[in-house]
């Protein structure tokens, strides 16, 4: 994996490259979906597509949301492949049922996680109390990870106040 930066520091070429690679992976998933169970298709998504969406996401996906539309559309097409959904089916429920984040939620999550790691614990505790639906969805995906972080933060704050 790599990142492409244009001479004008836009991430247009990188997003086009990632969209192209994910489109190719979509073709593979269409061909194998009749032979694999849903759980395995989800594992293929997590192994083959998800890394492209996550790699340097905080940097290149923090642009105008309209620039990510093509990538989001390809991601939705792949999400419809996993449970054999129809072409026009709304994907919001599919993302929730498969416990996956779309590209916009993934970017918000990674920015929030970065902010929690690089801010004082008190600020992170306030941030964790005001989080939106994407963090709640993340808690469902990886149970206990954020809860342990918040719990440890609360314990630290209580120790500091004593």
Image (cartoon, helix red, strand yellow):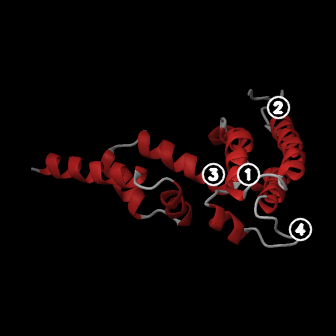
Q: Is residue 46 left or right of residue 35?
A: left
Q: Report x, y in % for residue 37.
A: 73, 56
Q: Are marks 2 and 1 in contact (CB under 8 Å)?
A: no
Q: CA distance from mark 2 to mark 1?
A: 38 Å
Q: What is the secondary structure assignment of the residue under circle 2?
A: loop
Residue that numbered label 4 is attached to: 87
Mark 3 or mark 4: name the one nearer the start of the chain. Answer: 4
Q: CA distance from mark 2 to mark 4?
A: 37 Å
Q: Residue at x 37, y 55 (%)?
A: 147
Residue that numbered label 2 is attached to: 8
Q: CA distance from mark 3 to mark 1?
A: 20 Å
Mark 4 or mark 1: name the one nearer the start of the chain. Answer: 1
Q: CA distance from mark 3 to mark 4?
A: 23 Å
Q: Are marks 4 and 1 in contact (CB under 8 Å)?
A: no
Say few, some or many: other residues with alpha carbon within 10 Å of mark 1 (under 14 / 14 to 19 / 20 or more): many
Name the disc covering residue 41, or none: 1
Mark 3 or mark 1: name the one nearer the start of the chain. Answer: 1
Q: Nearer the viewer, mark 3 or mark 1?
A: 1
Say few, some or many: other residues with alpha carbon within 10 Å of mark 2 (under 14 / 14 to 19 / 20 or more): few
Name the disc covering residue 136, or none: none
Identify which residue, 6 or 143, lies in the foreground.
Answer: 143
Q: Residue at x 52, y 65 (%)?
A: 132
Q: What is the secondary structure assignment of the residue under circle 3?
A: helix
Identify which residue, 104 or 92, lies in the foreground.
Answer: 92
Q: Is residue 76 left or right of residue 60?
A: right
Q: Report x, y in % for residue 33.
A: 83, 54
Say few, some or many: other residues with alpha carbon within 10 Å of mark 3 (under 14 / 14 to 19 / 20 or more): many
Q: Nearer the viewer, mark 2 or mark 3?
A: 3
Residue that numbered label 3 is attached to: 106
Q: Are marks 2 and 3 in contact (CB under 8 Å)?
A: no
Q: Is residue 66 left or right of residue 43?
A: right
């Amino acid at each position: 994996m790599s990142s492409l930066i244009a001479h004008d520091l836009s991430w247009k070429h990188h997003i086009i490259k990632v969209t192209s690679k994910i489109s190719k992976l979509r073709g593979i998933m269409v061909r194998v979906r009749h032979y694999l169970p849903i759980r395995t298709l989800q594992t293929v998504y997590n192994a083959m597509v998800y890394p492209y969406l996550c790699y340097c996401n905080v940097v290149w996906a923090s642009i105008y949301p309209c620039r990510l539309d093509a990538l989001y559309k390809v991601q939705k097409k792949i999400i419809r492949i996993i449970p054999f959904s129809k072409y026009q089916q709304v994907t919001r429920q599919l993302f929730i049922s498969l416990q996956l984040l779309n590209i916009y939620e993934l970017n918000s999550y990674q920015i929030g996680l970065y902010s929690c790691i690089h801010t004082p614990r008190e600020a992170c505790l306030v941030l964790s109390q005001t989080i939106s639906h994407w963090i709640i969805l993340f808690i469902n995906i990886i149970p206990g990870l954020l809860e342990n972080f918040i719990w440890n933060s609360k314990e630290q704050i209580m120790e500091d106040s004593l």
